[in-house]
Image: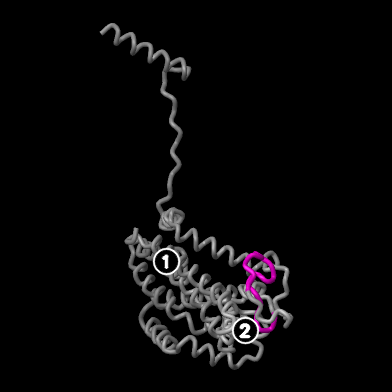
């Protein structure tokens, strides 16, 4: 027992001498971790390889569409028939002849790089139009209900009955100079119905929550309740649908350009795919590279949407 007391006394003395006082050293306060839906979703996304891969691809595509001159110094429009259907030279990475030449002697690599801008613009702008318009209509219909909900729901059903591709073809026929903005507007006018249904269902669920009822009991107006409580808590499913739909709009723009009703006097992957389909037997590379870039782009946005959906849905964690 004396030996045990001496050992305890020695340890206590060492503690006092290291801290300068008899009190224990204060612990550093732990950093609080947010448990909100968006914070948990972001922490989950950072651990998903699918999200990281798709995000890297999308960021690269955005850089290509914004600054194509960083990736090639070749002019994609003029052609040189001395390079007629010249095959790719895969050893010349980043050079003009990397992907070969098309039937007009134009660099396929340069056209793929500059064609990304039209596809990305149409996808992003169309998604913005569809999300804003569909969210507004769905929020109004779901929150107020009654006859207003019935009218807006029937209007949504009417627009849902019009195929987006067929309707876009009819609308774009009325324009002679079709740009990326024109194509985006034509698709956006017809493509908002899915977002409307998703937002309406989310709003109907959220408006029955206790915090919404409490805000209404305290005298908050409809505008404040919608913007402060209903909208922020209804956005998660809308973001998922919009992200996945963005890839669909890019492929829809390529389809319109393939049919000759898309972007005019510009470079588009769909137009190059149309040109390449005529040479599919003689020079497959003319079709392969623009189609490959289109497929990778659409797949990247679909993968991103799937990752966001899994992260925002607590049932899937």
Q: Left or right? Give the position of 217 relative to 164.
A: left
Residue holding disc 1: 306
Instruction: Name the residue: 38% across, 15% down.
Output: 12
Residue 211 placed where, x, y %?
A: 36, 61
The N terminus: image quadrant: top left
> Which quarter of the figure is the C terminus placed in?
bottom left
Magenta run includes residue 104: yes
Q: Majority secondary structure of the magenta segment?
A: loop
Is residue 278 at all visible to an observer of this figure?
yes
Q: Position of residue 201 (x, y in %)?
A: 36, 73
User: Does the segment drawn in magenta span residue 155?
Assistant: no
Report helix, strand or loop for mark 2.
loop
Q: Position of residue 158 (x, y in %)?
A: 42, 89
Compared with residue 117, is residue 26 higher up or lower down, i.e. above or below?
above
Residue in the image at 38% along x and 11% along y: 10
- Nearer-N-terminus badge (2/1): 2
- Report whether 86 appears left or right of 46: right
Lateral position of residue 312 relative to residue 280, left or right: left
Quadrant in which residue 85 is drawn = bottom right
What secondary structure is marked by label 1?
helix
In the image, which residues are magenta?
88-105
28 or 153: nearer the viewer: 28
Q: Nearer the viewer, residue 21 or 93?
A: 93
Q: CA distance from mark 2 to mark 1?
A: 29 Å
Of 97 and 45, the residue lying toward us: 97
Q: Name the residue carrying label 2.
A: 263
User: Looking at the picture, does residue 308 appear above or below residue 122?
Assistant: above
Q: Is residue 34 above or below residue 208?
A: above
Measuring from the top left, give residue 105's x and y in whole percent. 70, 80
Residue at position x 59%, y 89% in the image: 260
Which of the colour schemes (rainbow, by chain, secondary structure, one colour) is used? Answer: one colour
């Amino acid at each position: 027992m004396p030996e045990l007391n001496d050992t305890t006394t020695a340890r206590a003395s060492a503690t006092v001498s290291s801290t300068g006082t008899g009190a224990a050293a204060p612990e550093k306060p732990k950093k609080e971790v947010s448990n909100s839906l968006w914070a948990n979703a972001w922490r989950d996304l950072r651990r998903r390889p699918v999200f990281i891969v798709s995000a890297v691809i999308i960021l690269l595509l955005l850089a290509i569409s914004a600054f194509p001159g960083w990736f090639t110094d070749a002019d994609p429009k003029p052609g040189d028939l001395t390079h007629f259907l010249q095959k790719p030279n895969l050893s010349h990475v980043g050079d003009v002849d990397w992907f070969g030449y098309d039937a007009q002697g134009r660099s396929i690599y340069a056209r793929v790089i500059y064609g990304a801008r039209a596809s990305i613009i149409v996808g992003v702008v169309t998604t913005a139009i569809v999300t804003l318009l569909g969210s507004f209509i769905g929020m109004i219909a779901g929150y107020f209900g009654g006859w207003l909900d019935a009218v807006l729901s029937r209007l949504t059903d009417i627009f849902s009955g019009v195929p987006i591709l067929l309707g876009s073809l009819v609308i774009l026929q009325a324009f002679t100079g079709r740009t990326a903005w024109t194509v985006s507007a034509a698709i956006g006018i017809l493509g908002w119905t899915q977002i409307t249904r998703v937002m309406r269902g989310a709003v109907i669920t959220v408006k029955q929550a206790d915090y919404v009822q409490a805000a209404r009991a305290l005298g908050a107006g409809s505008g404040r309740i919608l913007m402060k409580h209903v909208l922020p808590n209804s956005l998660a499913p809308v973001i998922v649908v919009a992200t996945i739909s963005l890839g669909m709009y890019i492929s829809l723009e390529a389809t319109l350009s393939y049919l000759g009703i898309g972007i005019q006097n510009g470079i588009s992957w769909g137009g190059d795919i149309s040109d390449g389909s005529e040479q599919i037997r003689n020079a497959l590379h003319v079709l392969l590279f623009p189609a490959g870039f289109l497929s990778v782009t659409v797949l990247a946005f679909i993968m991103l949407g799937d990752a966001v959906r899994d992260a925002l849905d607590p049932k899937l964690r």
